[in-house]
Amino acid sequence: MNLKIKFSESDIKIPLKTQLSTSTSAVVASSTSTAQVAPSMTLPNLAKKMKKLASSQLFNLKLLLNGESSRGFSKFKKNYKLKGELGRGGFGIVYRAVRIRDDLPVAVKFIDRNSVKEWARVNGEQVPMEICMLAKCSKTRGVIRLIDWYSIPEGYLIIMERPYPCVDMFDFIKGQGKLNEDMARFLFRQIAQTVTECAHNRVLHRDLKDENVVIDLVNGSTRLIDFGAATSLRKTQYSDFQGTRLYCPPEWFLHSLYLGREAAVWSLGVLLYNSLNGRLPFRNEKDICTAHLLGPLPFYVPVSQDAKDLINKCLAFDPFQRCPLETILQHPWLSNISPSWEILTNQKNGTIDKKGEKENKKLEDDHGSEELEEVDNETNDKKAQKKQNNETVGSEESGVGSSEGSSIKNTTKKASANPVSRLSKTSLLVAPTSGEIKAAVQASKTTTQYNNIKPQRKTMMPRHPQPPSSTVLTALRRAMSREAQKRVDIVAARI
Ligand SMILES: Nc1ncnc2c1ncn2[C@@H]1O[C@H](COP(=O)(O)OP(=O)(O)OP(=O)(O)O)[C@@H](O)[C@H]1O
């Protein structure tokens, strides 16, 4: 047998000072042991298998050497500075960070390699589908911009733009209780436009919800985030789903099938209802499938006929009767001209009311924390505790009937006779109050452009000493092991 497996020199660059950790040897050893071959295997198959094995060994080795590749952790550390946790969901942790070269605010999303369900190729490299979909939408207006990505042994780091200051739409709605029609229209129009443009690029987001929309508080522009459930848009039906159940159309629960555009329109209907009412239209799968039998959807606040009409058209039980995605933007409710963001955020009876200096002070503190702050596990643990408390207090999601899990990733919630506003979400962010949002908008008026903010922040804020690079890595790993432990606990509790 003449097996030739070639490695170019550039593939393996092992600096002399690099110490192979015991885990490295373990991986190599374990890979070697799997090389034992069944006697019945034919030669070409054997050659193929060996080649595959060798390349996976090389891949593991490169990962364990941490970043000798252009996308390794050491490259990440050279380019970005982690500052603290932004939020977390069922599949990842998102960190606040800055690009060292120019202080650009970025968000760094860590995704665990083991949680990646779908893979794709970008420039010949195998990456999680989330990265591929973000890359595909890089020029789509209203989609968060993918700046870079890195591969570490435990998973991937996705570097995205982070509008500053910003808030996600869940917190924005929660801060106001509900949005008035002008504000809801201003935001919803952008989101519908973005979803339509994504569809033109053959990208289907599949997890449209308020938590996955980030609002730039400077100008009110929205960014669609979290493409973790996204996939290529096709005309035929889908039979897999990873999004959030309460935003999911009835055909999925009834037939385990759905069409991409039609399902997106349903989710947009849920999002719009949620924006105007401050609560979701359905509490559980049973409601989603049966609400149409009980007459018109209840509205808990006065809402115009046009808005109701658009919501009802998006939430038509029959997917073929639903408003087509491409025509949402032509609906009369959306053709009304919206006041500017500045006016919207200053409206007296509008969405953002004035609150005292205390909140302004808190916002200043938040600006302060924009400067270097190590990934702080203790704070995160406190946030986690707070989230748990929230979930116990706000034990329902809203709407009609009794409550079950709001999301595949959420915990089970109990029923209640009187629907209340939503109190919890999958991320750990504590919702800012309307005063804080207002203050953020005010603060941003003096620093409208990122370019303007940069020098001021640099000179005004004292810099803390830079953490040793290993601190960041340790913090990441600790966060991940906490995540893993949590999952083990959940499974153990279920058993
Ligand atoms: N680029 C960004 N800029 C600002 N905030 C962000 C950004 N990306 C994520 N976030 C914040 O982090 C939270 C979690 O992000 P994301 O939804 O991507 O994580 P996830 O683990 O996929 O969550 P989920 O369980 O909902 O799928 C968001 O709700 C948002 O508040």
Image (cartoon, helix red, strand yellow):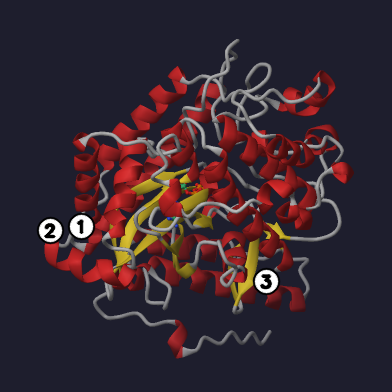
Q: Nearer the viewer, residue 472 or 491?
A: 472
Residue under the image location 16 percent in, 62 percent down: 466
Q: Secondary structure at mark 2?
A: loop
Q: Is there any visible trace of residue 149 in the rendered image?
A: yes
What residue would you read off at disc 1?
372
Q: Residues within 10 Å of mark 3 (few under 14, many from 20)?
A: some
Residue 382, placed above or below residue 401 = below
What residue would you read off at disc 3?
49
Residue under the image location 45 percent in, 47 percent down: 344
Q: Nearer the viewer's eye, disc 3 or disc 1?
A: 1
Q: Pinpoint residue 279: horizontal percent, then vertical percent.
A: 57, 28
Asked where in the image residue 275 lies, by quadrant, the reply is: top right
Asked where in the image residue 224 lies, by quadrant, the reply is: bottom right
Residue 128 is tagged as none
Q: CA distance from mark 3 to mark 1?
A: 48 Å
Q: Nearer the viewer, residue 11 or 330?
A: 330
Mark 3 touches mark 2? (CB < 8 Å): no
What residue would you read off at disc 2?
464
Query: Which sits earlier in the primary sequence, circle 3 or circle 1?
Result: 3
